Amino acid sequence: MTPYAMPPYRIKMVEPIRLIPKEDRVLRLKEAGYNPFKLRSEDVFIDLLTDSGTGAMSDAQWGALMQGDEAYAGSRSFYRLEAAVKEITGYRYVMPVHQGRGAEQVVLPLLVKHPGMIFLSNTHFDTTRAHVEIAGARAVDAPCKEAFDIAANIPFKGDFDLGLLEAQIRRVGKENVAGIIMTVTNNSAGGQPVSLSNLRAVSELAKRYGICRIIDGARYAENAYFIKQREPGYENATIRQIAREMFELADVFLMSSKKDGLVNIGGLIAIKEDETLFRMAQTRIVPYEGFPTYGGLAGRDMEALAVGLNEALEESYLAYRIDEVRYLGEKLRALGVPIQYPIGGHAVFVDCGSMCPQIPFDQFPAQAVCNALYLEGGVRAVEIGSLLLGRDPDTNENKKAPLELLRLTIPRRTYTFQHWDYVAEAFAKVYAMRSRIKGLRFDYESPVLRHFTSTFRPIE
Ligand code: P61
């Protein structure tokens, strides 16, 4: 028997992909300014840029699309989605938004009451950090000590450092903490899960200080699956029960539904019981996202999301999903490639800082390895390191990320194990030439979320 779970589905529809010749890849990458975000997807063979909106929908979701009610106000599809979210979270108020950052732009500024406030998180993802800063606050991370030690083999590397969290609250004073954001799973630390016991401790601490508790739950179902696998006492709980327990520990749920909603576009705001916050969010949603019963989505998008949210909680789906990521990770590990370990929920993260010590952090080693991987095999990965982290908003200096990670992100229900064999072979070739990979410098540096649109030149 294979040590990996079987896919609990078969393929009904396919989308052709092709590998363009090596000399074309050299040209396309140069035209893209050595930034894989600027490649055309038809020039990419296996696209591991992100798991966001890139998964395959099920036949049930495609069927649901046809039932979309496109009414501007009071859409039937909204009420279906609302019922699904209420059932999963137990929260009273639900608002759709166009994607995760839509939820962030609506809710986060409402929590910033005066200048000088901070948000605390196990790790803010980059769009979250950007919206915190746009709202005039600062984002402070309090991840556990092992989060960025790739060799530390502990089950919940996404946890908060509780001592550090409380120290930060005391340092600035509780009246200056706008909220505590629990990112599950912790994307920037390698898709690492957060334990229920840690979430509970964070929640109690926040309650004690009267601070708003927010779940950034783009991958909450994957987090719940890890809890079932790894946290004593939850072996026999269902994924739904675990998810419900997670939601009980927060006041607000923000979600990019392009991940564990199994849809190509969509996001959610859910509020447990704070009617005032709900009213204020509703007021902001109208100018930024749309009328509150569609929030930037089509009726059909809401139908697909209502179905996808439930499919993502199925244990057989999650078992295969997590094993697929593990399969690729174990292959790279067997080659000696330094990866974040244990392997996370949505991606394999390679430590390019230790792989290419000849490249300084501000010449972006992980971006350089991404480029080498594209040239080698037409595989598109993404940098999660100092390029993504950007500049300090106060000093304008390049910030140094704790790790220079390259992320091989696995879209849901999309590729096969043969594709992973191919990716591992391509990576092996890049790994063999790692000492010859050169750093990058900016040709153009974009002022906000710079990794998306900046262009580079390799340093000779
Ligand atoms: C990703 F290169 N993540 O991981 P939106 N919270 C969390 C996320 O992971 C997240 C959002 C909020 C992406 C997409 C992405 O620079 C990048 O629906 C934990 O993307 O607005 C998104 O959700 C925001 C990729 C985002 C990037 C920003 O690939």
Image (tube, grey):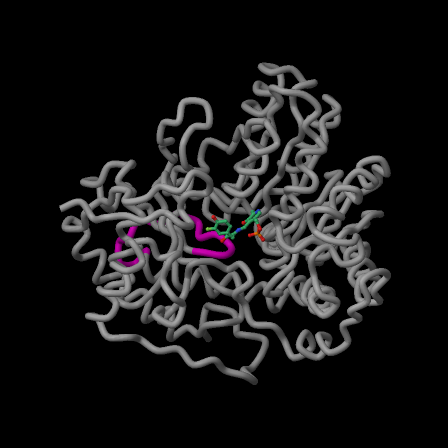
Q: Residue furthest bottom?
A: 12
Residue 299 placement (x, y as % from top left) = 75, 67
Which image quadrant for residue 216? top right
Residue 154 shown left or right of residue 334 in the figure: right
- Residue at (60%, 68%) from the top-left corner? 317
Figure disc tally: 0
Above/below status of 128 relative to 294? above
Residue 265 placement (x, y as % from top left) = 61, 62
Q: Is residue 224 visible?
A: no
Q: Main secondary structure of the magenta part?
A: loop
- Residue at (72%, 33%) from the top-left corner? 110
Q: Is residue 395 visible?
A: yes
Residue 419 placement (x, y as % from top left) = 38, 72
Residue 19 inside the magenta-drawn segment: no
Residue 13 shown left or right of residue 307 in the figure: left
- Residue at (23%, 75%) from the top-left corner? 21
Residue 444 shown left or right of residue 301 in the figure: left
Which image quadrant for residue 427? bottom left
Q: In the image shown, does 383 or 426 lie closer to the viewer?
A: 383
Q: In the image shown, does 297 or 174 lie closer to the viewer?
A: 297
The range drawn in magenta is 333-347
Above/below status of 376 relative to 104? below
Above/below status of 190 relative to 79? above
Which image quadrant for residue 262? bottom right
Residue 273 placement (x, y as % from top left) = 84, 40
- Residue at (83%, 37%) from the top-left corner? 274
